[in-house]
């Protein structure tokens, strides 16, 4: 058994780049090797009703298969040098740009369990509240993010405005990324880089379904595929 396990370690280390090997291959508690997570990307606008629906569906998904998923959000907007605060036009106004920045900074500087609950909290307050400084500060408190004294506040603005320099830069980068990925509608769901569903007023182009269990099934299938292919031991 030990020799077989060692072979797996060596085979997996060999398959990874040198930078990845150390971080990715820490044995997990059961003695199993770290696995390859399924990349799940949501193209959203923070104050968009369809994004709120999507993120609520994915809240169920993450509860069930969160440990198999590498979740991230990418924001939809238009770079616009005439916009005084954000340099980006957001469909639901500047307050939405602020909400996008708050979420980007939380994502960059906290664990997923924290930033995901932060977003859920903002959504729970209602889409007209997303992006307001008081919403960000209250939600940070609710999920134990020390906004004022942490990198999150530094990034997004300690006053909660979303106008921190780093955060504004992240927003521009994020909307450019979104355009490059060909994502136009909030919300667009990508699993392993492949568009699997859009929520735009109604659900569209969701061949595999749009209920939590449909995404869970697709993630489980992709997880099996990724972790069978990369081990080379099947
Ligand atoms: C760019 O921003 C200005 C200032 O807010 C606005 O008047 C204009 O409509 C925006 N342009 C686009 C293409 O969104
Ligand atoms: C933009 O995309 C690059 C390449 O995938 C990624 O490394 C970066 O984190 C993304 N930036 C944001 C703000 O999402």
Image (cartoon, grey):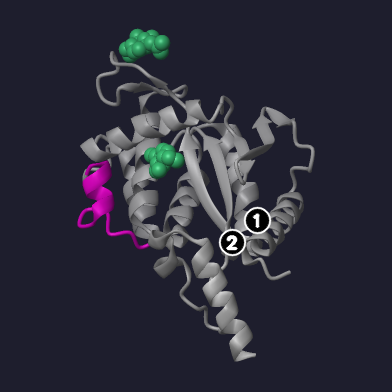
Residue highlighted by disc 2: 66
Task: Find ligand 2 in the image and state its quadrant.
Answer: top left
Residue 46 visible in the displayed image: no
Q: Residues within 10 Å of mark 1 (few under 14, many from 20)?
A: many
- In the rendered image, residue 76, in percent from the top left (x then y), is placed at 48, 28
Q: Residue at x 31, y 40 (%)?
A: 133
Q: Position of residue 229 (x, y in %)?
A: 67, 60
Mark 2 residue element: helix
132 falls in the magenta region: no
Is disc 1 in contact with disc 2, using a CB cutoff of under 8 Å?
yes
For the C terminus, give its image quadrant. Answer: bottom right
Instruction: Give whichever of 35, 70 is nearer the camera.
Output: 35
For residue 204, above or below residue 101: above
Q: Residue at x 56, y 84 (%)?
A: 31
Look at 35% across and 50% down and name the residue there: 108
Residue 201 in the image: state x and y as whole percent: 67, 27
Q: Is residue 47 left or right of residue 184?
A: left
Q: Nearer the viewer, residue 35 or 144?
A: 35
From which residue to which does the magenta span run? 144-157
Using residue 234 as the reference point, say whether residue 160 is left or right of it.
Answer: left
The residue labelled by disc 1 is: 61
């Amino acid at each position: 058994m030990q020799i077989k396990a060692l072979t797996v370690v060596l085979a997996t280390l060999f398959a990874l780049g040198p930078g990845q090997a150390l971080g990715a291959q820490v044995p997990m508690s059961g003695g199993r090797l770290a696995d390859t997570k399924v990349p799940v990307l949501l193209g959203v606008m923070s104050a968009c009703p369809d994004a709120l629906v999507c993120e609520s569906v994915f809240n169920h998904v993450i509860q069930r298969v969160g440990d198999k998923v590498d979740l991230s959000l990418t924001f939809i907007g238009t770079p616009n040098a005439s916009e005084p605060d954000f340099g980006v036009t957001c469909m639901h106004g500047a307050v939405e740009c602020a909400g996008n920045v708050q979420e980007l900074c939380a994502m960059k500087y906290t664990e997923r369990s924290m930033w995901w609950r932060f977003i859920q909290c903002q959504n729970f307050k209602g889409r007209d509240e997303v992006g307001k400084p008081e919403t960000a500060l209250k939600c940070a408190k609710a999920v134990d993010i020390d906004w004022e004294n942490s990198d999150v506040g530094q990034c997004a603005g300690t006053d909660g405005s979303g106008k921190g320099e780093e955060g504004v830069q992240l927003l521009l980068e994020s909307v450019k990324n979104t355009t490059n990925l060909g994502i136009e509608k909030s919300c667009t769901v990508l699993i392993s880089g492949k568009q699997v569903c859009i929520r735009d007023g109604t659900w569209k182009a969701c061949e595999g379904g749009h209920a939590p269990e449909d995404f869970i099934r697709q993630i489980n299938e992709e997880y099996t595929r990724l972790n069978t292919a990369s081990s080379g031991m099947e």
